[in-house]
Every structure is written in C-alpha cells, then in structure tokens.
Image (cartoon, helix red, strand yellow):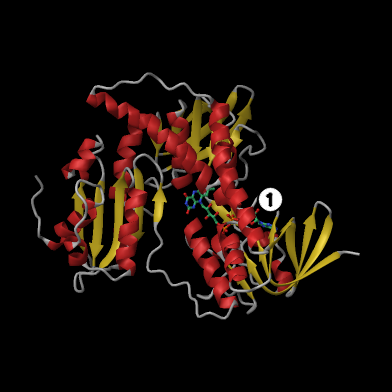
C-alpha cells in the first residue's frame, strides 16, 4: 500500500518562496509538509543561483579591485588560481545555508519529503521518492516550483561545453575562450567571474542594450568598463547557428556582428522559464498559461481558492526576495491573517563590477508611459569616497513626482550599488520626498551620501559640482 501523509498545508518546492512559506505557516501553527525533489533545501537561489554566484563574484571583484591599487603604488602579480579550492569554498557557503534550512525545518516540525510531486486531485499530491510513491493529502497547498533555464532548439545543449548557469557555477574548468549568449544579469555575472579567472569573453545580446529593462544611462557605465575587459560585446546580434565540433563550439552570428567564431565553451543565459507545466496542476484544476506561469491574485491565490502559488512560477521579476515575500503572504493568508502582496518597488541588482541596481519607476518606463518626473543625478566623480576607491565611474539617479516631490524610482551604478539601493527602496515605501532624502544627514565620506546629494540635485539646492 502507498504511504499516505495527511497535512493542513502542502508546499511544493523548497526554494526561497517555498521554504519561507513553509516556515511561516508552521510558525503560525499550521501542520506543514514541504516537498522538494533535490536532496537539499533552498531551491535555485541557495544551491545554483544567488548564493554560489555571489560567492564567486566576491572573489572576482577582489581580483579586479587589487588592480586599482597600482594607482596607490601597490602592485600584485597575476592571481594563482586553485580551482578545486575555489569550488570547495563556494560549496561550503552553500552547504552552511542549506544545512541551516534543514535544521530550521526540523525545529518547526515541518515534514520534508524528498521527491518529485505532482497533483492528482484538488486535495492530493503524489510524490515519487527514492523509496517509492507517497501520497500527500492536504487542506491547502502552496505551489513554489520555481523556474528552469531556457534552452534554445537547435543548440547542442547535450554537449557539456554548452553550459547553462548551473553548469557554469560548477566551475569545472576555466575555458580560454568563452561565449556568453544573453547579456542579461545572469550572463553578465558569470562573464565577470570567468573573466576575472582568465577567460577571454565574448557577449552576444539580441537587443540593442545589455540588461534590457534597465535604464540605458546606468547600463552604459557598466558597458564602458566591461568593453575594456572583454574581447567583444555584440549588441543587436543573434546566434544563427551553433555546432559542437571536436576542436570547439562553432558559432555563427548575424545582425550587428556577422561572422563565425570558435569557442572552448558557451554559456547560454537567455532567460528562465516557469516550471508550471511540470506538476500536473490541471489535475487540481489550477490554470497554467501557455508559458507555464500560474496566475495569482494579491493574496497569492490561484483560480482554485485553497491553492496558492508563489515565486518564479507566478510571473513578474524572477527574484528571490520577491519569492520569499510572496511566500510569507501565502502562509499568512492561509493562517487567516490579513496579508497582501503589495510592494511599491521590487529592487533588481546585477552584481557585476560595477554593480547596477534599480527600483521603482525607471526613466525608460516613465517615457514609454508618458509619466512626468523630476530627476536628480549625482555623478560619483564628485564623491570623495568614490575617488578614494579609484572608482569614479558610478552615478546615483533619483526620480521624483514633479507635484508631490515624492520619490518614484532610483537607479545606481557603481561598486556596492546593490547595498545602496536598499535606502531608496525604504524611502519609496515610506513615501519619502526630495527633502526627506536631501535633509537626511548621511555619513561622510560614503557612497550612500550620493543618495542625499542626488536628491539635493533634483531639489536645486546644489546645482554646481566641484
Ligand atoms: P526556486 O528557487 O526555483 O525553487 C523551486 C524548487 O522547487 C526547486 O528546489 C525545485 O527543485 C523544486 N521543484 C520544482 N518542481 C518540483 C516538483 N514537481 N516536486 C518537487 N520539487 C520541485 N535572484 C535574486 O534575487 N538575487 C540574485 O542574486 C539571484 N541570482 C541568481 C543567479 C543565478 C545563476 C540564477 C539561476 C538565479 C538567480 N536569482 C537571483 C533568481 C532566484 O534564484 C530565483 O528567483 C529564486 O530562486 C526563485 O525562488 P522560487 O522559490 O520561486 O523557486
């Protein structure tokens, strides 16, 4: 007979959405079963996403940063790289977090079932485990099955030299020539890692700018710097053909660049697709759209009132902090609390060197929608701190409502932009206006001062820099 588990709440997928939801529901007194096909909790973010990539990017940033010390009379030689140790270091960071999650699940008596789950009916999931199938009967379910890298038909994905982000993070070797297909955040982050480790990088992007969706003035700052480090960045260009040959991966390009190149490895980072089609959601009556997204309301409810969905599978920005916030909302709604997913801004960060971060309204969006705004831009060339870091390329940009003077959006490019954007998100959520930011005393000399100074620029209280 098949083992059966009865639970109040079943959570399908243990990424940042799923584990957050499971823990919150348990803290609110619910009995929870958390189903995860991988051997560790944490999903893409902890195992093969945010965390390992940032561990490697930190190392890459230091390799780049020591080069700036030449200006202060300190010179280092070329780095010696012990790839096995670097891999182990990264894996240790991941293992600390995933084992921490395991302990947190145990503490809360969240029952973790390892296996692949599929819906069988509106109140039943079947999970294929190593020991055979288990049926989980639930009162309420939270779908948190995440997303996977998009594969391009016709590319030789079966060849180990054609990588997705998971393969690239495995860091098996340092290819001499590496092509990055897709100039979005994930592609550019991995480019930064491999470039710092010594690979010669080409980037090909279909659109007219890198990181489509981010304001061009921010991206230009990053682009100028990485154009110096990389061999080629081809915009408005597509890969027409890719073939695995014994001597390498042959790639034919068309559009902005037309030519043939040979690579040791290729990273395909052209986006991610939701996993909504892989869970037999229709057996529970849950609607899944043609792309595999599951639409939800602001309570994270699907079209089936007792089934919720959160994270990458629901659409919107595919980001860990969005998934975890949605997870909390779903758990609280299930526990009868008046929760709503209603953010004014979801920050996005490219942890490249320099970092690019933005939140709220972008100028591109404002122009497209005819939204009026006042703008304050503070160039980091006028920041003593940035000069001391030998990183004067950055800029901090704030957009305000011309009538109420409230903050509408912010964009920052420069080292630590990802940390700095936090202040802008809080300011927006608190309804801060130009004066709130300009009159706040920021510590000197810091990069966070540039937020106050950008507000002063918009306000007109400083007009002249240096
Ligand atoms: P996921 O993390 O995808 O988790 C879903 C889980 O469900 C997985 O563990 C999967 O195994 C499991 N699952 C799926 N189907 C089933 C099934 N049928 N049965 C059982 N288990 C199942 N975001 C950021 O905010 N910051 C970053 O810096 C960042 N960096 C990234 C870097 C890379 C290289 C990548 C790939 C992504 C990055 N992201 C980043 C995105 C982030 O990882 C995702 O937005 C986040 O993980 C989504 O969380 P989730 O809970 O929706 O799903």
- Residue 66 appears left or right of 318: left
Near mark 1 (Cα within 10 A), the count class, few <14, some 14-19 or many ≥20, is some
Tag 1 residue: 38
Q: Residue furthest top?
A: 77
The image shows residue 374 at horizontal and vertical percentages of: 20, 64
- Depth check, front residue: 154 or 37: 37
Element type at mark 1: loop
**Above or below: residue 305 compared with residue 344:** below
**Above or below: residue 319 compared with residue 280:** above
- Residue 433 appears left or right of 252: left
- Depth check, front residue: 201 or 81: 81
Q: Which quadrant of the structure image shows residue 140?
A: bottom right
The image shows residue 447 at horizontal and vertical percentages of: 25, 47
Going 40% across and 37% down the picture, which residue do you hit? 234
Going 43% across and 34% down the picture, which residue do you hit? 60
Q: Quadrant of the N terminus?
A: bottom right
Q: Which quadrant of the structure image shows residue 343?
A: bottom left
Going 58% across and 39% down the picture, which residue do you hit? 91
Q: Residue furthest front?
A: 107
The image shows residue 39 at horizontal and vertical percentages of: 69, 49
Going 26% across and 37% down the picture, which residue do you hit? 391
Query: Can residue 260 be seen from the camera position used here?
Result: yes
Q: Quadrant of the C terminus?
A: top left
The image shows residue 76 at horizontal and vertical percentages of: 35, 21
On whether ligand 1 comes within 8 Å of the CB at mark 1, the answer is yes
User: Count of labels shown?
Assistant: 1
Q: Quadrant of ligand 1?
A: bottom right
Query: Can residue 13 be seen from the camera position used here?
Result: no
């Amino acid at each position: 007979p098949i083992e059966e588990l009865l639970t109040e709440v079943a959570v399908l997928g243990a990424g940042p959405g799923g584990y957050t939801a499971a823990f919150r529901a348990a803290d609110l007194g619910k009995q929870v079963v958390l189903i995860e096909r991988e051997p560790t909790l944490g999903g893409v973010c902890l195992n093969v996403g945010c965390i390992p990539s940032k561990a490697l990017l930190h190392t890459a940033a230091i390799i780049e940063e020591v080069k700036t010390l030449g200006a202060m009379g300190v010179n280092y030689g070329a780095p010696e790289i012990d790839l096995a140790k670097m891999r182990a270091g990264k894996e240790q960071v991941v293992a600390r977090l995933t084992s921490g999650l395991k302990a947190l699940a145990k503490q809360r008596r969240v029952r973790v079932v390892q296996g692949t789950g599929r819906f069988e009916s509106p109140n039943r999931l079947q999970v294929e485990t190593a020991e055979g199938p288990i049926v989980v009967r639930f009162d309420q379910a939270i779908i948190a099955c995440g997303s996977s890298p998009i594969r391009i038909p016709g590319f030789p994905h079966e060849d180990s030299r054609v990588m997705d982000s998971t393969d690239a993070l495995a860091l098996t070797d340092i290819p001499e020539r590496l092509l990055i297909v897709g100039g979005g955040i994930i592609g550019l982050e991995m480019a930064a890692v491999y470039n710092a480790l010594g690979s010669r990088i080409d980037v090909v992007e279909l659109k007219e700018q890198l990181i489509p969706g981010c304001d061009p003035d921010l991206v230009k700052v990053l682009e100028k710097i990485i154009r110096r480090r990389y061999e080629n960045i081809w915009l408005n260009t597509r890969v027409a053909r890719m073939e695995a040959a014994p001597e390498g991966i042959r790639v034919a390009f068309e559009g902005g660049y037309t030519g043939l190149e040979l690579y040791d490895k290729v990273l395909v980072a052209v986006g991610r697709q939701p996993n909504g089609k892989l869970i037999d959601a229709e057996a529970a009556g849950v609607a899944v759209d043609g792309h595999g997204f599951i639409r939800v309301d602001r309570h994270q409810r699907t079209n089936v009132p007792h089934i919720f969905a959160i994270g990458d599978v629901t659409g919107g920005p595919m980001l860990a902090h969005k998934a975890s916030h949605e997870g909390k909302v779903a758990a609280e709604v299930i526990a009868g609390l008046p929760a709503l997913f209603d953010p004014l801004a979801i920050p996005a960060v490219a942890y490249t060197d320099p970092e690019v971060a933005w939140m709220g309204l972008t100028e591109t969006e404002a122009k497209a929608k005819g939204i009026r705004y006042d703008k304050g831009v503070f160039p980091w060339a006028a920041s003593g701190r940035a000069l001391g870091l030998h990183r004067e390329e950055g800029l901090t940009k704030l957009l305000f409502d011309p009538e109420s003077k409230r903050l509408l959006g912010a964009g920052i490019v420069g080292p630590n932009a990802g940390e700095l954007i936090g202040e802008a998100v809080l300011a927006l959520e608190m309804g801060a206006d130009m004066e709130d930011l300009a009159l706040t005393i920021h510590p000197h000399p810091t990069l966070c001062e540039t937020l106050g100074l950008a507000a002063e620029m918009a306000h007109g209280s400083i007009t002249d820099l240096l």
